[in-house]
Amino acid sequence: MQSKEKNNNEIIILGVDPGTTIMGFGLIKVKKNNMEFMLMDELLLSKYDSHALRLKKIFERTLQLIDTYHPDEMALEAPFFGKNVQSMLKLGRAQGVAMAAGLYREVAITEYLPKKIKMAVTGSGNASKEQVAKMLKSMLGITIPKNLDSTDGLAAAVCHFYNRKNISHGKSYSGWGAFVKQNKGRVK
Amino acid sequence: MQSKEKNNNEIIILGVDPGTTIMGFGLIKVKKNNMEFMLMDELLLSKYDSHALRLKKIFERTLQLIDTYHPDEMALEAPFFGKNVQSMLKLGRAQGVAMAAGLYREVAITEYLPKKIKMAVTGSGNASKEQVAKMLKSMLGITIPKNLDSTDGLAAAVCHFYNRKNISHGKSYSGWGAFVKQNKGRVK
């Protein structure tokens, strides 16, 4: 387990924004309350015809990210409203398979609404993708990517960095059991 | 792999009906075009406060069923309409984690609408749970359980038995890759 080799004060956060056509994801390392950029990318799903194949790709990539970088915590961008019931069912499935990977590996998951993520990163819940990307550039020194979808996952990780102190009250926790115990009613 | 020890003409079908408060599941064995009842049960989720913990239980139980009984194919009861977007998002997540287990283990998944399942089992798309249970009793010799939710998973498996001939045109397929190839556009 890489987590055992890590410094106790070092936390890795995986942020994911799973959608039905694209999944953005990013990783940050938190050392002594400072964020350090690790990586950011996107998984293009629109090239796969089948919805089920897209779900498989989301699950596999999330699992691969967990098994490669051993994040301690996972932040999920999760809208709670959408255009119609069918699109929400599909979005729910995309979120479900990404969550399954985290749940399977016992990585604590916290959900954030898109507005909350924008607020945490830029100070405004109505910020544009460009504003979020610019803020991430100045915070973490990233090069702004062509496709801004990949910054959504990173933004979720950054949002979690700012909010996790409120969750854990300064304590670190690990494993899903401990997370559920400590955050009863938080993740519904 | 148990599948290698199995007779080529023997197929095991896992049927699941994942919901946010209960998951019904059932297994049938198909030998020379005859169904044989294996098991039927339900996973009670309402006792868990957290939505995330429920998702974890659905994923783990589905994975456990696959690893114990090595089904060749999986049938999913999947409504496509619901009361509101929030309940559909939650239902989508429940379906997503169950599907993730099947996708992870490369078990071919086919979705069926509730009406289609009722139609396949009873001949009427508007049949009651009681009528479905009675039909399953006469087909498979099951004892009707107290809680009829567990028959929903079994009914999905039976529905797949009747419909899989149409899918595979008499050929058997195994593995997700082959399934996607042969059923392009079928699972959306």
Image (cartoon, coloured by chain):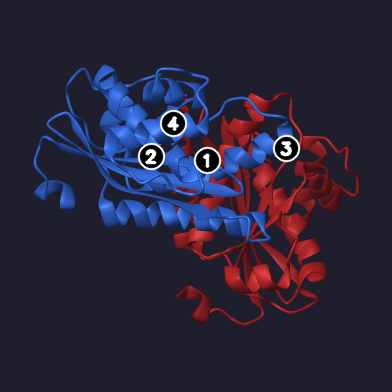
Chain colours: A blue, B red
Please name which of the two marks, 3 or 2, marks the residue nearer to the observer: 2
Q: For the point 33% across and 48% down, which residue is it? A: A105
Circle 2 packing at 10 Å, graded few (<14), some (14-19), many (20+), is many
Q: Earlier in the sequence, mark 2 or mark 1?
A: 1
Disc 4 secondary structure class? helix
Please name which of the two marks, 4 or 1, marks the residue nearer to the observer: 4
Q: Quickly name the residue at label 3.
A: A86
Q: Nearer the viewer, residue A112 or B95?
A: A112
Q: Quadrant of the N terminus of chain B?
A: bottom left
**Residue A60 position within the rendered picture, expressed as x and y whole percent measured from the top left:** 45, 58
Q: Quickly name the residue at label 2.
A: A154
Q: Chain of mark 2?
A: A
Q: For the point 48% across and 74% down, which residue is it? A: B2
Q: Are marks 2 and 1 on the same chain?
A: yes
Q: Quickly name the residue at label 4.
A: A132
Q: Quadrant of the C terminus of chain B?
A: bottom right
Amino acid under disc 1 = Gln
Q: Earlier in the sequence, mark 2 or mark 4?
A: 4
